[in-house]
Image (spheres, rainbow, N blue to C red):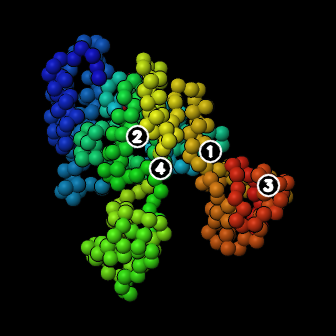
């Protein structure tokens, strides 16, 4: 928020934040430009507003084209590159672009006013020999999910990404910021650091309702049947493994909710009062989330981010040959069969045994398919 702005400017900004439609945003931005300070120090602000106006007009154009059936519909999602895609989600001005600049090769625009980034900004983070794609999502505010600020599009990036990094700014209430982001995510059907309900639902063309473990659901099998019929499901196999409440069952049935891993990146740790706010954040969210402070050298943050992603690197090697230079990157606790599957779809079936260097008792030890691998293991697959 720039200082020394007029009352009219502040009102126009308020209108912008509350605007729901593109048309309203355009009107508010025009108003902001009209009332923006015109002195030399405010040049950047004016430039930003003009760029934003241009972008909004483009969006409006696109919307009209879509409505009239012209123009290709564009997705906001960013094509995944690298081993994993981490989406940075945070409040306006929370330091997301600064972090992108620190951790990746991208050079996003950084500025001291909200809504600088209006398009997803991808960048590649190189940690040792692993490439991790980071995507800065445009800012999320309270009500983004229902169209406020830049609308729900930034949240949709979290749905398509693999892991969510919540960026929270230690110069203001951290617990409040994280709570807001989590609320917005839940509103669009994204739950973080939670186990998906242990239920399998397979629709089929005929055969009626077949329910296993129905009594594990709140209300029992009768309730399950009723919920299925309410959803127009008449032929299905349902297998429930753990106790569920009715809401969780509905959620699984509708298949709208996605489950993502998330962690918190704290920016502006150098601001006054940051220590206290970080302490409060740890009290409130430390059990559920890994909290990484970003006032550290880039290499250290990268390592912490990598360690937090729950990945392992595996180097395959041919018999009598050298290990591959580039690792395969898999989720932690992957076993030999998982590696084989990653190399080739039917490799896993043909696999007889493997030899492992690294985590094994001795170098080149022969191990079975279900042997669980560790980061940096070298593996020789024998089919
Ligand atoms: N003191 C301090 N200032 C920071 C830090 N990180 C970012 N800033 C400042 O905060 C402002 C916003 O930074 P950005 O990285 O543009 O924020 P953003 O989250 O990308 O903002 P939007 O794209 O508008 O949502 C800039 O003026 C930065 O210089 C930090 O660690 N310490
Ligand atoms: Mg930004």
Quadrant for residue 13, please give it: top left
Q: Nearer the viewer, mark 4 or mark 3?
A: 4
- Residue 189 position in % (x across, y down): 35, 54
Tell me the residue at 46%/34% (across/down): 283
CA distance for labels 3 and 2: 39 Å
Give the mark nearer the N terminus: 1 vs 4.
Answer: 1
For residue 157, say whether it is visible. Answer: yes
Considering the numbered disc 1 on the image, is that residue within a helix, a strand or a loop? strand
Label 1 and label 4: CA atoms lie apart by 23 Å
Residue 97 visible in the current orientation: no
Q: Are marks 4 and 3 in contact (CB under 8 Å)?
A: no
Q: Residues within 10 Å of mark 4 (few under 14, many from 20)?
A: some
Q: Looking at the image, is mark 3 or mark 2 nearer the viewer?
A: 3
- Local SS, label 3: loop
- Mark 4 / mark 3, whichever is N-terminal: 4
Q: CA distance from mark 4 to mark 2?
A: 15 Å
Residue carrying label 3: 360
Q: Quadrant where the N terminus lies?
A: top left
Q: Is residue 337 left or right of residue 301?
A: right
């Amino acid at each position: 928020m720039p200082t020394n702005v007029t009352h009219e400017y502040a009102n126009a900004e308020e209108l912008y934040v509350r605007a729901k439609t593109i048309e309203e945003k355009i009107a508010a931005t025009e108003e902001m430009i009209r009332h923006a300070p015109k002195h030399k120090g405010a040049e950047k602000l004016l430039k930003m507003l003009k760029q934003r106006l241009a972008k909004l007009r483009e969006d409006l154009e696109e919307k009209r084209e879509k409505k009239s059936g012209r123009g290709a519909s564009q997705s906001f999602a960013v094509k995944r590159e690298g081993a994993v895609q981490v989406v940075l989600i945070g409040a306006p001005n929370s330091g997301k672009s600064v972090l992108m600049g620190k951790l990746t090769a991208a050079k996003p625009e950084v500025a001291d006013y909200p809504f600088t980034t209006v398009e997803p900004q991808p960048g590649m983070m190189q940690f040792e020999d692993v490439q991790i794609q980071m995507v800065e999502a445009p800012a999320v505010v309270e009500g983004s999910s229902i169209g406020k600020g830049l609308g729900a599009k930034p949240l949709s990036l979290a749905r398509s990404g693999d892991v969510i990094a919540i960026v929270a700014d230690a110069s203001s209430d951290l617990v409040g910021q994280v709570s807001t982001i989590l609320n917005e995510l839940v509103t669009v059907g994204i739950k973080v650091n939670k186990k998906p309900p242990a239920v399998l639902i397979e629709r089929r063309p005929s055969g009626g309702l077949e329910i296993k473990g129905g009594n594990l659901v709140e209300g029992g099998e009768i309730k399950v049947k009723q919920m299925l019929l309410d959803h127009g499901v008449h032929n299905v196999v349902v297998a429930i493994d753990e106790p569920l409440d009715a809401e969780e069952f509905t959620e699984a049935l509708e298949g709208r909710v996605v489950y993502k891993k998330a962690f918190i990146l704290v920016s502006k740790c150098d601001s006054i009062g940051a220590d206290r706010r970080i302490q409060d954040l740890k009290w409130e969210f430390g059990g559920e989330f890994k909290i990484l402070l970003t006032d550290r050298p880039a290499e250290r943050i990268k390592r912490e981010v990598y360690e937090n992603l729950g990945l392992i690197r595996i180097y395959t090697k041919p018999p009598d040959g050298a290990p591959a230079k580039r690792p395969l990157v898999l989720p932690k606790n992957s076993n030999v069969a998982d590696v084989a599957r990653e190399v080739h779809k039917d490799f896993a079936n043909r696999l007889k045994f493997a030899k492992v260097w690294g985590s094994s008792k001795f170098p080149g030890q022969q191990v079975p398919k279900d042997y669980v691998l560790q980061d940096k293991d070298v593996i020789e697959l024998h089919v």
